[in-house]
Image (spheres, rainbow, N blue to C red):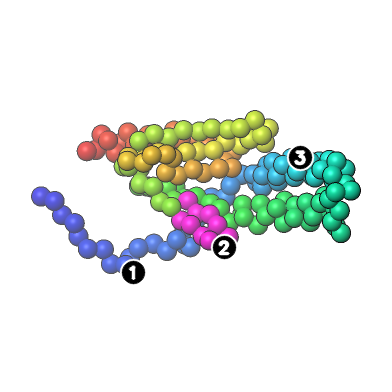
Amino acid sequence: MFRNPEIVLEDLPDMEDLEWQAMHPRYARRIQLERLIFTFIVLAGSVVLQFVLGSRLSPSVPIWVLVIILALPFLGWPSISVPRRGYVLRDKDIVFRSGVIWRSVTAVPFNRVQHVETSSTPLDRKFGLANLQIFTAGGSGGDLQILGLGADRAEKLRVYILDKVGASIENH
């Protein structure tokens, strides 16, 4: 017979009491390098634009100076945001948190997982990183994506989750 007992809210674990696993230490530098490349391209374009349209575009502050000023927080943000990301692997689910200003916590139960994959860009591979994407039943895309894991850790998590999914299917 189906039973659905009531759960006392005080018995639920507090998210702050969990032992959060951090992203790989090189992940912030990888994001900063990607942003530095992007900033360099924008800066080069603004310098070319300044020279091509020099006399017609005569602002009091050159465009490239504005690009540099705006680039500083853009390049520094990963040092603030990456340490606030983390995941917890529990018996029946995986929980991921992110965000500095707007915080988000996502839990994906293993019995809802349909597919798990790892991926990496050339820049990820240069830093020894990979991304884990978890797809659940009824989802149109990846329901949870954890970026910035070590390549070996991402693969171990993928195998572990697939083993858990197989175990939950066998128990039904």
**Above or below: residue 123 compared with residue 54:** above
Tag 1–tag 2 contact (CB < 8 Å): no
| Mark identifier at residue 41 | 3
Q: Is residue 148 visible?
A: yes
Tag 1–tag 3 contact (CB < 8 Å): no
Q: In which quarter of the image is the C terminus?
A: top left
| Mark identifier at residue 101 | 2
Q: Is residue 160 visible?
A: no
- Which mark is nearer the camera, 1 or 3? 3
Disc 1: which residue: 10
* Separation of marks 3 and 2 at Cα, in angstroms: 28 Å
Residue 141 occupies which quadrant of the picture? top left
- Which mark is nearer the camera, 1 or 2? 2
97 drawn magenta:
yes
At 78% from the left edge and 51% from the top edge, which residue is drawn? 67
Q: Which residue type carries mark 2?
A: Ile
Instruction: Give the class, few, some or many, for how many residues have Cα within 10 Å of label 2's Cα (few <14, many ≥20).
Output: few
Q: Position of residue 71 (x, y in %)?
A: 75, 52
Camera-side residue of 156 and 75: 75
Look at the image and give the residue range highlighted in magenta. 96-105
Q: Which residue type carries mark 3?
A: Ile
N-term mark: 1 or 3? 1
Q: Which residue type carries mark 1?
A: Glu
* Separation of marks 1 and 2 at Cα, in angstroms: 27 Å
Q: What secondary structure is found at the residue carrying circle 3?
A: helix
